[in-house]
Image: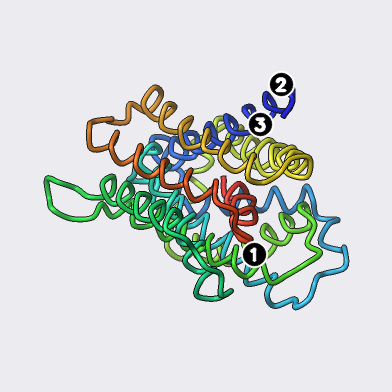
């Protein structure tokens, strides 16, 4: 990989990490309801790339709609709801369970096989995530991180379904995720988040800037750049390097949101990221696809 392209990949990962921390700020200190935030973001994405909805729709059409709903309503809704109470650094670690979940689903659904090395990676990732999720003071799983884990699960299911489709262009996929998700998210926000519009207006220009950043810079800009790099280099080179995103999120959470970072968090992060690295370095038909889908969840 050239130094220029490596710098571009670092920039992409930093943008995704910044978006994770910013999303926590929006649904946390800023007080914007999480489903409303997701609704506004997807509405803007849909408007900006609306023409891509008129491209020939890949078949089966129902599968694309299901994938879009899983990534939009399932993934984003669960992630933003989780971030309301979870720290961005802990969420970044728990999100890594999506990688072993996708690998396990590929075995169950697609009949793929895993060796002992990927098995070890799966065990390390789950152990690290559980260490971060567990609340040692109350002997219970932290609720906010359960939503984050569900977000990773929905993204993994979407990756498996996407494996069975062909001919979906990146911007077309983004357009359908936005268009299919904005309606149910708007309905859910209307019924369970009273006063959401007032909260968004009260947040003012910082909320507008956050939505513009997440929709334009993240969903459209950084993802388009990422796809250029994926086409240019092998996935087993790109995928491990994207671990800069959770590392950047952890650093940003500690520096800007004052996330606690104790020995338990350090162990969990190290184990989970090591497990993901082991899985990513082992060639797999679904892993490159999941890393691309996972990137779209940022």
Q: In the rendered structure, which disc, 1 or 2, sits on the residue that comes first in sequence?
A: 2
The residue located at (73%, 58%) in the rendering is 173
**Sequence-first disc among 2 and 3:** 2
Q: Are marks 1 and 3 in contact (CB under 8 Å)?
A: no
Q: Kindly identify which residue carries mark 3.
A: 9
Q: Position of residue 252 (x, y in %)?
A: 44, 27
Q: Position of residue 23 (x, y in %)?
A: 49, 40
Estimate the x, y position of residue 239 in percent, counting from the top left: 60, 43
Instruction: List the residue tagged with mark 1.
Output: 68
The residue drawn where x is 46% and y is 50% is: 80
What residue is disc 2 on? 3
Q: Nearer the viewer, mark 1 or mark 3?
A: 3
- Residue 236 got which mark? none
- Mark pair 2, 3: CA separation: 10 Å
Place of residue 241 in the rendered image (x, y in percent of width and height, measured from the top left): 58, 35
Q: Dividing the picture into quarters, in which one does residue 147 lie?
A: bottom left
Q: Nearer the viewer, residue 140 or 195?
A: 140
Work out which residue is located at the far front of the displayed protein and give it. Answer: 116
| Residue at horizontal 30 percent and vertical 41 percent from the top | 268
Quadrant of the drawing holding the N terminus: top right
- Mark 1 packing: few (<14 Cα in 10 Å), some, or many (20+)? many
Whole-Å distance between the Cαs marked 1 and 2? 35 Å
As measured in the structure, the alpha-carbon distance from the residue carrying label 1 to the one carrying label 3 is 25 Å
């Amino acid at each position: 990989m050239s130094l220029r392209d490596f710098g571009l990949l670092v920039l992409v990962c930093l943008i995704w990490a910044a978006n994770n921390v910013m999303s926590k700020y929006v649904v946390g200190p800023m007080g914007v309801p999480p489903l409303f935030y997701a609704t506004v973001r997807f509405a803007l994405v849909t408007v900006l790339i609306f023409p891509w909805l008129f491209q020939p729709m890949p078949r089966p059409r129902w599968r694309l709609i299901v994938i879009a709903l899983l990534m939009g309503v399932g993934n984003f809704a669960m992630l933003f709801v989780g971030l309301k109470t979870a720290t961005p650094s802990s969420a970044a670690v728990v999100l890594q369970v999506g990688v072993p979940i996708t690998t396990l689903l590929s075995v169950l659904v697609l009949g793929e096989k895993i060796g002992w090395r990927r098995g070890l990676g799966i065990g390390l990732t789950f152990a690290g995530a559980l260490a971060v999720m567990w609340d040692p003071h109350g002997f219970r799983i932290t609720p906010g991180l359960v939503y984050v884990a569900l977000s990773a699960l929905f993204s993994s299911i979407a990756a498996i379904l996407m494996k069975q489709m062909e001919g979906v262009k990146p911007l077309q996929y983004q357009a359908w995720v936005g268009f299919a998700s904005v309606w149910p998210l708007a309905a859910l926000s209307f019924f369970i988040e009273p006063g959401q519009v007032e909260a968004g207006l009260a947040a003012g220009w910082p909320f507008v800037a956050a939505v513009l950043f997440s929709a334009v810079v993240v969903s459209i800009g950084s993802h388009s750049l990422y796809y250029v790099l994926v086409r240019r280099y092998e996935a087993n080179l790109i995928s491990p390097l994207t671990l800069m995103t959770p590392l950047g999120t952890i650093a940003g959470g500690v520096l800007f949101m004052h996330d606690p970072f104790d020995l338990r968090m350090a162990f969990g992060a190290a184990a989970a990221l090591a497990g993901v690295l082991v899985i990513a370095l082992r060639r797999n038909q679904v892993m490159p696809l999941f890393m691309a889908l996972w990137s779209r969840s940022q």
